[in-house]
Amino acid sequence: MSSPYTAFKAIIKRDLLIAFRHRSEILNPLLYFVIISALFPLAISTEKAFLAKIIPGIIWIAALLSSLLSLDKLFRSDYEDGTLEQMMLSRHSTALLISGKIFAHWLVTGFPLLLIAPVLAAALYMPVNGYAALLYTILLGTPVLSLLGGIGIALTISLRRGGMLLVIMMLPLYVPVLAIASSALKLAIGNEIYTSELYTLAALLTLSLTLAPIAIASALRISLR
């Protein structure tokens, strides 16, 4: 008889194996992030002083859009092959199993952004004093995007063409993360204190970790009826 912790690890391992078998699930959001970040300077200006002012917005808009691109993969294949129904019938907490899936999703889509963002920041002439804030905001903010996105995809999973509806639902929820993370980066670049923004992101992450899996489980039960 497996323990909840064993089931949690099994979900993560399974989803990571599936993701690495379909490497496009890892590469597509990452390439999307790179392309958006690279196109902004070409469309606006390549002047170093100007880029230093807008780089927080560039990076976080790119992160937000790449997160939206990857959301549909979170539960879709499990819904289509019946795995999701089996998960809902498991004796283990559905919220716990969903937390494992979201953590695996973040490892595939959010963690690579943490690795590539400093390289893009250097290419966009970000001042050195902004790098720590960049890593902190991505580390705290991208899991919130995955957790909130899980609620949206759970509500629209039974719809064949729910992509646009998902975007409309998620953008208002994503805006606070975008605004707070961009503000932290701007303050860091300007050599100002940004700890209050980091604490706010940490509070949002804690709140999302606590409530989002429960909300997703409830939304999936409604969608699977």
Image (spheres, rainbow, N blue to C red):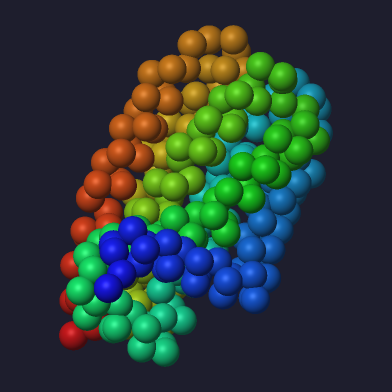
Residue 197 percent across, percent down from the top left: 41, 24
- Which residue ends up furthest to the bottom in the rendered image? 81
Q: Is residue 116 above or below residue 17?
A: above
- Which residue ends up furthest to the front in the rendered image? 1
The quadrant of the picture occupied by the N terminus is bottom left
Q: Is residue 144 above or below residue 99?
A: above
Residue at the image point whose x is 59% and y is 10% from the top: 191
- Image quadrant in which you'd find residue 27: bottom right
Residue 68 shown left or right of residue 197 in the figure:
right
Residue 106 percent across, percent down from the top left: 50, 55
Residue 36 percent across, percent down from the top left: 68, 51
- Image quadrant in which you'd find residue 22: bottom right
Residue 149 shows up from this direction: no
Question: 171 or 218: which is nearer to us?
Answer: 218
Residue at the image point whose x is 52% and y is 50% from the top: 64
Residue at the image point whose x is 21% and y is 58% from the top: 214
Residue 25 percent across, percent down from the top left: 61, 69
- Image quadrant in which you'd find residue 188: top right
Residue 136 shown left or right of residue 213 in the figure:
right
Residue 189 shows up from this direction: yes
Question: 112 or 5: which is nearer to us?
Answer: 5
The quadrant of the picture occupied by the C terminus is bottom left
Residue at the image point whose x is 31% and y is 69% from the top: 2
Q: Is residue 49 above or below residue 147?
A: above
Question: 218 or 107: which is nearer to us?
Answer: 107
Q: How many marks?
A: 0
